[in-house]
Image (tube, rainbow, N blue to C red):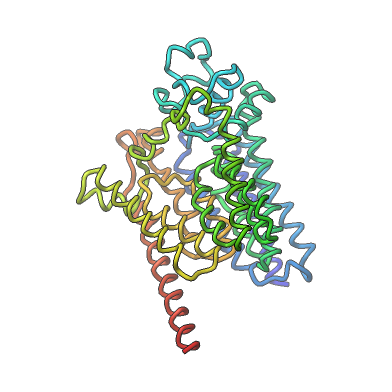
């Protein structure tokens, strides 16, 4: 009983923090206070999991789990209403609205950059001035563009419409996770990490990043994979990958998970449907349909770890070739090593997280399903600590507190990555020891 009461109290405290985050006001100079509250919410989320992970939410405490879900939904509504159409951690939403507007005018969004003269008539004072990198064409794949167009058609460019659409997909993500964990035999208690994740609240209810559109497709594909339905899995992975290309990381491992002819069915469904989705944008564009993606791969840089270490010894271009080469080597290794398909998926995206030159916080949503299955302490920690990367916004919104544009606190970066790598090494050591014991027992 004491554990049940403490769990509910912790959740109510988490809800209170969500209220304090926005009320009575939500002004950008409060960035220090906001980050402090978010960090506290992350610590609360770990305490909630610690109190609840041993409870039987399948049978004995089934009603309590329903109450917890309602409270988690209340937190989301508080954050959604509190944030309204305000943004100060990311301005990506304006590119989404712009791409939707361009598509609504019957123009291929991959064809022109926002600053190109051909789109001069579409410029306005509400969206266009806030678009980041307006000299670059869009990098977002076709399914993302379809969502942008749909949201623009429904809301006429109203940012709240985009946020509501993303919120619906986030709630759908939870229910699909609930179904998937049931199928693979993982207890509901693990979902506490997702329900009370500050990363989810910040990136999809405040900043409204599009990655949440792809996760339901990924999880639905995993459910279809468990049910041995390769055609449906292929179709769903095509959708996931064309919301964000990160879905491509998982496709090869799903391919090898299937047996014999099922592999060909999965691959054919994936390729044919992906081509179908790309076709309307590809006509007349050829390979320019990738937009500014090549530039992104060779130029973008944000809160990297291994890549930033390499910059101390190599030029930027050389460092990028090294990390992408290392990522390719990891991919090949994982194809041949004997591991569970979900462990491989977690490892490949984990490798990307370690090696990428640009690790924006919302990218980590793609590893969330595998965190819930594997309970990786390192990536639990990173989903919370990565939010410390927003400390550079202090210099943007309140220069009096922090001198210099896009300045950052190196100690906060160390607080983000040092524990992460220590936990990663500890987890790797446990896995190696378990493999050694397994080999010894067989011999």
Residue 133 spot, x, y in % from top left = 41, 27
Q: Is residue 236 above or below residue 114?
A: below
Residue 105 spot, x, y in % from top left = 59, 16
Q: Is residue 321 above or below residue 127?
A: below
Residue 215 spot, x, y in % from top left = 60, 48
Asked if residue 374 shows in the view, the reply is: yes
Residue 76 spot, x, y in % from top left = 66, 45
Please give left or right for residue 93 compared with residue 158 in the image: left
Which residue is drawn at the image coordinates 55% and 34% (left, top)?
26
Q: Residue furthest front?
A: 261
Asked if residue 412 shows in the view, the reply is: no
Q: Is residue 191 above or below residue 207?
A: below
Please give left or right for residue 107 compared with residue 302 in the image: right
Along the line of sight, which residue is nearer the eye, 145 or 301? 145
Along the line of sight, which residue is nearer the eye, 398 or 262? 262
Q: Quadrant for the N terminus, please.
A: bottom right
Q: Residue furthest left?
A: 313
Which residue is drawn at the image coordinates 55% and 40% (left, top)?
242
Quadrant in the picture for residue 134: top left
Q: Residue furthest top?
A: 121
- Total marks in image: 0
Please give left or right for residue 162 compared with residue 110 in the image: right
Which residue is drawn at the image coordinates 61% and 55% (left, top)?
194
Which residue is drawn at the image coordinates 76% and 62% (left, top)?
64
Please give left or right for residue 25 compared with residue 119 in the image: right
């Amino acid at each position: 009983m004491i554990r049940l009461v403490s769990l509910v109290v912790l959740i109510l405290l988490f809800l209170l923090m969500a209220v304090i985050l926005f009320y009575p006001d939500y002004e950008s100079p409060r960035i220090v206070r906001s980050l402090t509250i978010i960090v506290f919410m992350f610590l609360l989320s770990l305490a909630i999991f610690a109190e609840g992970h041993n409870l039987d939410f399948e049978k004995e405490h089934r009603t309590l789990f329903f109450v917890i879900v309602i409270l988690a939904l209340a937190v989301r509504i508080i954050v959604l209403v509190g944030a309204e159409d305000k943004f100060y951690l990311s301005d990506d939403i304006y590119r989404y609205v712009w791409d939707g507007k361009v598509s609504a005018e019957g123009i291929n969004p991959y064809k022109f950059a926002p600053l190109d003269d051909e789109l001069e008539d579409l410029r306005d004072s509400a969206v266009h001035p806030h678009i980041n990198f307006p000299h670059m064409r869009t990098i977002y794949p076709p399914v993302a563009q379809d969502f942008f167009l749909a949201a623009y058609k429904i809301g006429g460019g109203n940012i709240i419409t985009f946020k509501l659409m993303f919120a619906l997909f986030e709630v759908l993500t939870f229910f699909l996770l609930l179904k998937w964990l049931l199928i693979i035999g993982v207890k509901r208690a693990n979902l506490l990490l997702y329900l009370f994740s500050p990363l989810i609240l910040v990136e999809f209810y405040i900043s409204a990043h599009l990655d949440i559109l792809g996760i339901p497709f990924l999880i639905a594909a995993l459910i279809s994979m468990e049910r041995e339905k390769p055609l449906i899995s292929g179709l769903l992975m095509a959708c996931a990958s064309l919301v964000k290309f990160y879905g491509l990381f998982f496709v090869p491992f799903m391919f090898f998970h299937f047996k014999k002819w099922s592999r060909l069915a999965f691959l054919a469904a994936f390729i044919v449907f992906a081509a179908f989705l790309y076709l309307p944008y590809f006509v007349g564009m050829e390979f320019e349909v990738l937009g500014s993606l090549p530039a992104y791969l060779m130029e973008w840089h944000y809160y990297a770890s291994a890549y930033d270490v390499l910059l101390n010894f190599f030029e930027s271009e050389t460092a990028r070739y090294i990390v992408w080469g290392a990522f390719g080597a990891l991919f090949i290794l994982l194809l041949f090593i004997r591991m569970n398909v979900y462990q491989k998926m977690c490892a490949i995206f984990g490798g990307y997280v370690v090696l990428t030159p640009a690790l924006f916080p919302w990218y980590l949503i793609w590893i969330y399903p595998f965190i819930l299955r594997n309970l990786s302490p390192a990536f639990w920690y990173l989903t919370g600590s990565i939010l410390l990367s927003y400390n550079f916004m202090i210099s943007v919104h309140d220069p009096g507190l922090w001198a210099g544009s896009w300045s950052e606190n190196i100690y906060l970066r160390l607080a983000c990555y040092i524990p992460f790598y220590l936990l990663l090494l500890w987890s790797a050591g446990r896995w190696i020891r378990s493999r050694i014991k397994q080999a010894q027992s067989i011999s």
